[in-house]
Image: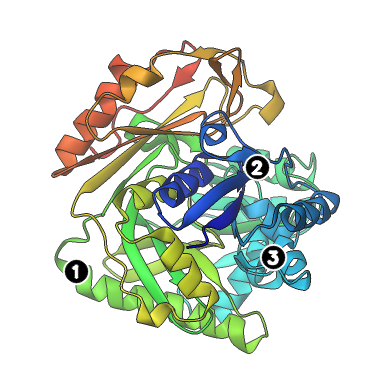
Amino acid sequence: MDKKRILVVGSGGREHAILWKLRQSRRVGELFSSQANAGIAQIAEDLKNPVETAEDVARLVEQAKTLGIDITIVGSDKPLELGVVDAFQDAGLAILGPTRDAAQIEWDKVFAKYLMVRNNIPTAPFTVFTELEPALRHVHERRDLPFMVKASRLARGQGALKCKDESQAVFQLERILKTKSFGEDQAAIVEKCLTGSELSVTAITDGESFQTWPYIRDYKKLLDGDKGGNCGSMGAWGPASLGKGKFLIHRQVKRRVVEPVLRALRVRGRTFVGWLYPGIMVNLFGVKVLEFNARLGNPEAQVLMRRLRTDLLDIVEAILARQLKKLKIEWHRKYAVCVVMATEGYPQADEDEYPKASIEGLHEAAKVPTVVVFHGGTMEENNVIYTAGGRPLSVTALGDTLVEARERVYDAVEWRISCPKLKYRLDIAQI
C-alpha cells in the first residue's frame, strides 16, 4: 500500500490538529508543514515557508513538486486569499480548499454581505464606507446603540468591534480608514448588532454535495463573562446543544444559509470546495449569518478533530474525487472542550511583539486522561518550548459529559502547564 505524502498549509493550532488527526491514519506516510511550530515539528517536516506573499505561494508549489506531495490541505485564510489553491491546480497538484474567487466570501466581507442580500441569506442590515468623514457622520446620527464596526478584509480575528457609544465607533473607524491598522484597501462596515446565541457551523463540500458537522460554541471575547474585546477565540466546546429547537435551527442553517450560499457561488463560476464555516446568531426569530469563513475555525478545528472518528484522509479523498455523498462521517460520542492559552498583550500586539517565555509542564499535562495540547505560536530552542505568538496553546480534552471534559482541560491548564506570560479564561464550557 502506497502511503500518502501530505502537506498542510498553516502554522497554528488548527493545522496542528489537522496533522495530528492525519497522523492516526494507516494510509498516511510523511507529513509536511508549510511552517511548523514546536508541536507540529514533532510530527511533520518543516518547509519553513510562511506563505505570506505571491512569491511564497510559487515557492510552495515548487517545494510540493520536489517532495512528491500527493495532497495539500489549506488550513489558514491568508494563503487562500493569495490564490494558493489556484496555483496548485494550475500545476496539476491535488489540493483541498477553495479557489481565491470562492474564498472571497471570507477575505472580502463587503462581497459576502452583498452576496447574502442578493440571495436572501439572513444577515444584519449594514452600510459600507470607504472614506472616513461620511462614516463619522453616519455613526453620529445612529441611535441604535450598540452597533458593530467591522474591517472588510482579513484582520486576524480582530477587525470587529461592538460599539457601545460614538467614541468607540470613531476609534474603530479611524483604525480602519485613517491609520490603516488592519492594512490597506480596507472598507468599514457598520451594521446592526445582533443578539442571541452565537454558534459556529462547519460544512464540508466537494462542490456538488455537502455535509454539516456538529455545531461548536466558541468564545470570541477575551475575558471571563464574555467581556473585553474581540479576539480570534479563547476556547470552544462541542457538540453544542441547540435545545428544543434543534431541528428547526438545523433546517434553517441548511436551507437558508449553506445551500443558498454554495449555489450562489456556483452560478457565479466560483464553485466552493473544502470547509465552509459560517458564524451564525440564533434567537427567537431564527438564524442570521455574522460572517463566512472559507476554512476550518480555530479553535473549532481542535474540537472537531478530537471528536472525529472517521479517517480524515478518507474525507479528503472523497472531497477531491467528488464522492462526498457516498461517505458516512462518524463521530466519537464524547464532548470535547478546548481552552486557549494566550500570550500577554494578545490580541493588541503585533506577532513579533509578544514576549518570549518558556512553557513548562506540557509532559505533565499530557498525563491527564484524554488531554491533548495543540501548539499555535510556539518555538523550540535547546529542547525548551517558548511562546512565539498570540495564542501559543490550545488545550483539549474529551469526556462522557461536558463537565468531565471541562474538568480535565482545566486540570491541565491550571495545575500542570506553567508560563508567567500566558493567560486564559476560566469559564469556557461553563457559560
Q: Determine whether the residue tagged by mark 1 lies in a helix, strand or loop.
A: helix
User: Could you tell me which secondary element the residue under label 2 belongs to?
Assistant: helix
Q: Horizontal and vertical percent for residue 337?
A: 29, 40
**Which of the two discs, 1 and 3, labels the residue nearer the N terminus?**
3
Q: Badge 1 local density, few (<14 within 10 Å), some, or many (20+)?
A: few
User: How far apart are the alpha carbons under marks 1 and 3?
Assistant: 38 Å
Q: Is residue 417 left or right of residue 317?
A: left
Give how far across and how far down residue 89 sits, in percent: 72, 71
User: Could you tell me how far apart the alpha carbons at marks 1 and 2 are, in whole angstroms?
Assistant: 36 Å
Pinpoint residue 257: horizontal percent, then vertical percent: 43, 75
Residue found at the far bottom of this picture: 267
Kindly state the secondary structure of the residue where label 3 is placed.
helix
Q: Tell me the quarter of the image containing the C terminus.
A: top left
Sequence order check, earlier mark of 1 and 2: 2
Which residue: 54% across, 74% down?
320
Vertical arrangement, residue 295 with respect to residue 395, above or below: below
Q: Which residue does the numbered mark 1 point to in the structure image?
A: 245
* Few, some or many residues within 10 Å of mark 2 (<14, 14–19, 20+): many
Does 113 sit left or right of 318 as displayed?
A: right
On the image, numbered disc 2 is attached to which residue? 172
Q: Amino acid at mark 1?
A: Gly
Q: Position of residue 300 (x, y in %)?
A: 41, 49
The residue located at (59%, 32%) in the rendering is: 37
User: What mark, if any, has residue 387 been given in the picture?
Assistant: none
Q: Which residue is mark 3?
A: 85
In this image, 94 relative to 255: left or right?
right
For the residue pair 247 and 363, the one nearer the viewer reads as: 363
Q: Are marks 1 and 2 in contact (CB under 8 Å)?
A: no
